[in-house]
Amino acid sequence: RKEVEQDPGPFNVPEGATVAFNCTYSNSASQSFFWYRQDCRKEPKLLMSVYSSGNEDGRFTAQLNRASQYISLLIRDSKLSDSATYLCVVNGNSGNTPLVFGKGTRLSVIA
Amino acid sequence: NAGVTQTPKFRVLKTGQSMTLLCAQDMNHEYMYWYRQDPGMGLRLIHYSVGEGTTAKGEVPDGYNVSRLKKQNFLLGLESAAPSQTSVYFCASSYWDRGGEQYFGPGTRLTVT
């Protein structure tokens, strides 16, 4: 099983839609979870950390399910500016991978 | 506060040539990382450093060397470039390694012909 797996998409949604991404991870001992956003030809930037109790930042909600080892990101009322690739990130299994990045899920919000 | 900067932004090399990519951060971070990103492969860790004077191998270290002589700088060297090293290279830094947020530089687009 790969350390971090994501559906690559693309997800094509109309403006105003709600969209959810899921990510699974293999290391049951992982303690740190993040969602990063990467715009085309740009560097990844932290979108939000994911806490055990779940957390919300405006239109974005992140959830963690430790028992099933998955993380989710929900985007409500999608905007055109939300179009990007969303990377699921978890701290790694072994000493040589401090953080492991998923390959990303591409979102296109259409007018 | 510039954050993480990378030099150069673009480079074209011929097979067998060498070059050094420079990463600099002004956030006083202990940890620094070099990644490469290829289509369909995601970000893969090449080497990282947990402090000045220390380096460690990541997931894909072959063909690369690194040095961290100063806390704020992390250099990535390609001694004999190969077409398989055509990629986008990102440097990142963080306060700690086991779960701290990483801050990325803008990337270097390298083409090896």
Image: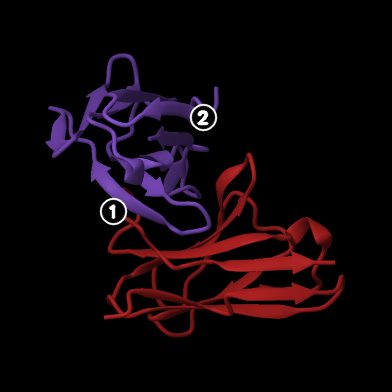
Chain colours: A purple, B red
Q: CA distance from mark 1 to mark 2?
A: 28 Å
Question: In percent of the image, x 50 and y 50: which residue is there?
Answer: A96
Callout 1 amino acid: Gly
Question: In percent of the image, x 28 and y 47: which residue is there?
Answer: A47
Pointer 1 and pointer 2 on the same chain: no
Identify the secondary structure beneath mark 1. Answer: loop
Give the residue furthest to the bottom: B70
Identify the secondary structure beneath mark 2. Answer: loop
Q: Is residue A38 left or right of residue B40?
A: left
Q: Is residue A94 left or right of residue B18?
A: left
Q: Residue A13: horizontal and vertical position, in percent?
A: 40, 26
Q: Is residue B6 left or right of residue B66?
A: left
Residue A10 image label: 2
Q: Is residue A68 left or right of residue B47?
A: left
Callout 2 amino acid: Pro
> In the image, which is nearer the foreground, mark 1 or mark 2?
2
Q: Residue A83: horizontal and vertical position, in percent?
A: 40, 42
